[in-house]
Image (spheres, coloured by chain):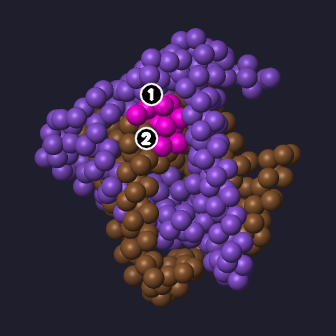
């Protein structure tokens, strides 16, 4: 109850009042990660992108899954807990939006459009390039916001702290460059 | 109470499943897959409900205009840390260490992190929030995930060339803050959580001031975020 009290006291959330507050949401996510660690493994996502790539390569009959050392040594061929976690995340986003509102087919975010116009190709190019860099970087580092920050820092891994500082520094700098000169 | 009992009962399971076939995480048996799916649904729903699957919420956090998602993430880390090490100490089998502490490849983490940050600001999603946003129907999140598949396979194909540089030097092994300090991990987790909560309260004051200062902007900003 005190959690929702504090959250409702957070200004600026008026238009987004259908959302869960950061305190309540954060506590629930921390408890979920505790449950995940206690039952199977820590929450993580980025390896699954390589899993899907490997799946596609095997489906088209490529020999890379067996000849490439990274794929053959690090990426499993059978569906595991972590793969199902990613499948669940897509379903969870869908179900939450279905039940509480938020289902959409929008392609260009309003904030993006206010800076770059509502061109779909332009937004898709940035989204694709962004996704490319996200996963190229995450697989270099060995994890993403989930595995290295949400779980890694919680596990007190020094690697998590280093990654968190790196992504925030670079993300803040890039976002400020993209929206430079904009007050809101 | 029941949940606590369940968690403790699962501890021994986790110890076995985590050592399953090479490369798999958390096991491949039916129970592992079902629990993984349900955990994922809760994870995706929490990200969506908290606004973390919103382009504007992520980008405005990185622009330091609205720190809601940063506060959400920090509280999740603090809660998770205390929770994990509490279960760990109750289970008494070094559960957290068993699941694996990420290796401290300093070059990999910094280079990978800097590249990741650029992608984060461009996409407005991270690899996980893109999945929840995609489930919600956001087409640019789906495109981000496609870009992610391309980035991941490019990494695989270039790995042999970059790996010696990334992992050859400044490799400090699976370092954990508690080990480095030679302290009880639960105590370190609780201390870190206290520091995080204090920092989040400070961020919250900044955020509240910022939003109060620009009340006309608040309405506009609200319109931007609420429409995702």
Crowding near pointer 1: few (<14 within 10 Å), some, many (20+)?
A: some
* Residue drawn at 69 percent across, 53 percent down: A22
Which mark is on residue B177? 1
Residue B3 part of the magenta-drawn span? no
Residue furthest out toward the right:
A1
Q: Colour of chain B?
A: purple
In the rendered image, the vertical position of residue B175 relative to residue B182, given as above or below: below
Q: Chain of mark 1?
A: B
In the rendered image, the vertical position of residue B71 relative to residue B2, given as above or below: below
Element under disc 2: helix
For the residues bearing labels 1 and 2, Cβ distance under 8 angstroms = yes
* Residue drawn at 75 percent across, 61 percent down: A10
Crowding near pointer 2: few (<14 within 10 Å), some, many (20+)?
A: some
Q: Is residue B169 left or right of B29 when viewed as pictured?
A: left
**Which quadrant would residue B191 be assigned to in this image?**
top right
Place of residue B54 in the rendered image (x, y in percent of width and height, measured from the top left): 58, 66
Give the extent of the magenta segment: A148-158
- As measured in the structure, the alpha-carbon distance from the residue carrying label 1 to the one carrying label 2 is 10 Å
In the rendered image, the vertical position of residue B129 relative to residue B12, given as above or below: below
* Residue drawn at 84 percent across, 52 percent down: A5
Which quadrant of the figure contains the C terminus of chain B? bottom right
The residue indicated by pointer 2 is: A161
């Amino acid at each position: 109850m005190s959690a929702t009290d504090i959250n409702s006291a957070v200004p600026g959330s008026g238009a987004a009042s259908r959302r869960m507050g950061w305190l309540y949401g954060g506590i629930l996510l921390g408890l979920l990660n505790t449950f995940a660690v206690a039952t199977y493994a820590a929450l993580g996502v980025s390896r699954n992108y390589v899993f899907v790539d490997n799946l596609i390569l095997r489906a088209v009959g490529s020999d890379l899954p067996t000849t490439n050392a990274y794929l053959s040594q690090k990426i499993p061929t059978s569906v595991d807990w972590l793969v199902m976690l990613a499948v669940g995340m897509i379903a969870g986003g869908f179900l939450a939006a279905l039940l509480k509102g938020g289902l959409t087919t929008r392609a260009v975010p309003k904030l993006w459009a206010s800076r770059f116009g509502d061109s779909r190709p332009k937004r898709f190019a940035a989204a694709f390039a962004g996704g490319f860099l996200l996963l190229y970087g995450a697989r270099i580092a060995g994890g993403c916001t989930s595995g290295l920050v949400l779980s890694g820092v919680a596990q007190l891994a020094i690697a998590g702290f280093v990654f968190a500082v790196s992504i925030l520094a670079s993300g803040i700098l890039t976002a400020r460059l993209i929206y430079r000169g904009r007050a809101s | 109470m029941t949940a606590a009992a369940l968690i403790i009962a699962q501890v021994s399971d986790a110890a076995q499943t985590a050592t399953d076939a090479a490369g798999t995480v958390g096991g491949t048996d039916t129970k592992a897959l079902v629990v993984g799916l349900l955990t994922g649904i809760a994870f995706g729903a929490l990200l969506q409900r908290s606004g973390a699957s919103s382009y504007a919420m992520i980008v405005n956090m990185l622009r330091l205009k609205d720190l809601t998602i940063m506060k959400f993430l920090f509280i999740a880390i603090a809660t998770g840390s205390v929770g994990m090490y509490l279960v760990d100490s109750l289970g008494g089998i070094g559960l957290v260490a068993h699941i694996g502490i990420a290796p401290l490849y300093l070059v990999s983490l910094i280079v990978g992190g800097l590249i990741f940050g650029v992608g984060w600001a461009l996409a407005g999603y991270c690899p996980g929030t893109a999945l929840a946003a995609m489930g919600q129907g956001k087409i640019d999140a789906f495109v981000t995930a496609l870009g992610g598949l391309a980035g991941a396979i490019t990494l695989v194909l270039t790995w042999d060339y970059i790996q010696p540089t990334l992992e050859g030097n400044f490799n400090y092994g699976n370092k954990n803050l508690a080990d480095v300090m030679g302290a009880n991990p639960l105590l370190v987790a609780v201390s870190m959580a206290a520091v995080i909560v204090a920092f989040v309260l400070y961020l919250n004051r900044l955020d509240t001031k910022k939003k109060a200062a620009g009340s006309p902007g608040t309405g506009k900003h609200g319109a931007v975020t609420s429409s995702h």
